[in-house]
Image: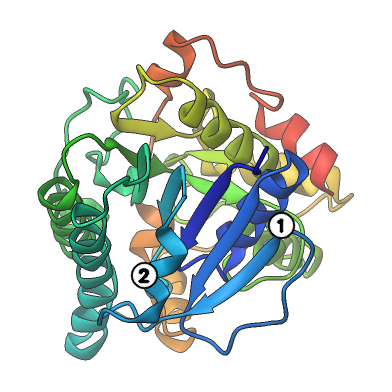
Amino acid sequence: MNPRKIVLAGGSGFMGGLLAAHFEKLGWTCVVLTRHTPQPPQKSRREVQWDGMHRGAWESALEGAEVVVNLCGQSVNCRYHARNRLTLMESRVRPTRLLGEVMAEMKTPPKVWLNASTATLYRHTFGDPWDEDGEVGAHPDAKDAFSIDLAQAWEVAFQESVPEGVRPVLLRSAMVLGRGKDANNVLSVLRRLTRLGLGGRMGHGRQFVSWIHERDLCRALEWIVGHEALEGVVNVCAPNPLPNQEMMRLLRKRLNRPFGLPAPAWALELGAFFLRTETELIIKSRRVVPGKLIASGFQFDFPEFGGAIDELL
């Protein structure tokens, strides 16, 4: 029998590497569509070059694929000036529409298309957590208007591009906790700050943080692929978000740092300016829970933040 095949569009980054390794261990063939020069094939993984904007020879990589996962998009860890806003938007919307155009012409398109999205879409809240039916929208205290516009435009592009007969899944994922020093691995940044004595609360510290362990991320996507009833919006996050001040307390405890200098709002603004990022990534309260995953019977290996960082660190 031929191995099952998964295509990871924009899969050369942090999340793509996690998923490729996971599905390879399951015996799948993994094809990564990348803007970079392709690396030599590794076991059951190969890279195919594309630009995400134009049709080309890369289209043949979709033939025989059972699953497509679209992870395209410039990192949101940047300043939201006009040039970056345009790049952030185009790097998500255009590849999504291109993939849909190609799949619509295939005689046998993939069975399921999983498209990345973000839990940032849910409204800033300190109240009850949001599941997939939660309220979506911007809030002035979170300074998240552009992020909401970006995510909604991406989801609309996906919904308008999914061919008939392909199961659509929008992955509204939270912060992924993983190993390694990749720039998109938030845990490595938090660990470094904590070791330097800067692991105190950020802002007032009451804002909720939604997260997921790298292993549960991969297991959740495997589960979604195998459960046809799961479609549309699916929250990919651990079931227990926690306040920022509690998250930092647990990190300090795990790293044996009794004290962490807190960062007031003005310091966050100053730091964000010099680090060329936005405070919204820190101050927004994201209290999101995985309603559909839990209802479908998915069991998390790491439902609590403390257990997740104990395993990772």
Q: Picture coordinates of residue 211 (x, y %)?
A: 54, 41
Apparent side of residue 21 relative to residue 106 in the rendered image (left or right): right
- Specify how the rendered protein is coloured: rainbow
Apparent side of residue 59 relative to residue 210 in the rendered image (left or right): left
Q: Residues within 10 Å of mark 2 (few under 14, many from 20)?
A: some
Residue type at numbered disc 1: Gly
Q: Which mark is residue 38?
A: none
Q: Picture coordinates of residue 128 (x, y %)?
A: 32, 20
Q: Name the residue beneath numbered marker 2.
A: 59
Task: Tell which of 127 and 85 is nearer to you.
Answer: 85
Q: Picture coordinates of residue 27 (x, y %)?
A: 73, 42
Residue at left offset 46%, top offset 65%:
61
Residue at left offset 74%, top offset 60%:
191
Q: Would you place residue 189 above or below residue 258 in this image?
A: below
Q: Which mark is residue 260?
A: 1
| Circles 2 and 1 in contact, beta carbons < 8 Å | no
Answer yes or no: is residue 278 visible.
Answer: no
Apparent side of residue 12 relative to residue 304 in the rendered image (left or right): left
**Quadrant of res 216:** top right
Residue type at numbered disc 2: Glu
Residue at left offset 42%, top offset 57%:
63
Task: Tell which of 47 and 105 is nearer to you.
Answer: 105
Which quarter shows the N terminus?
top right
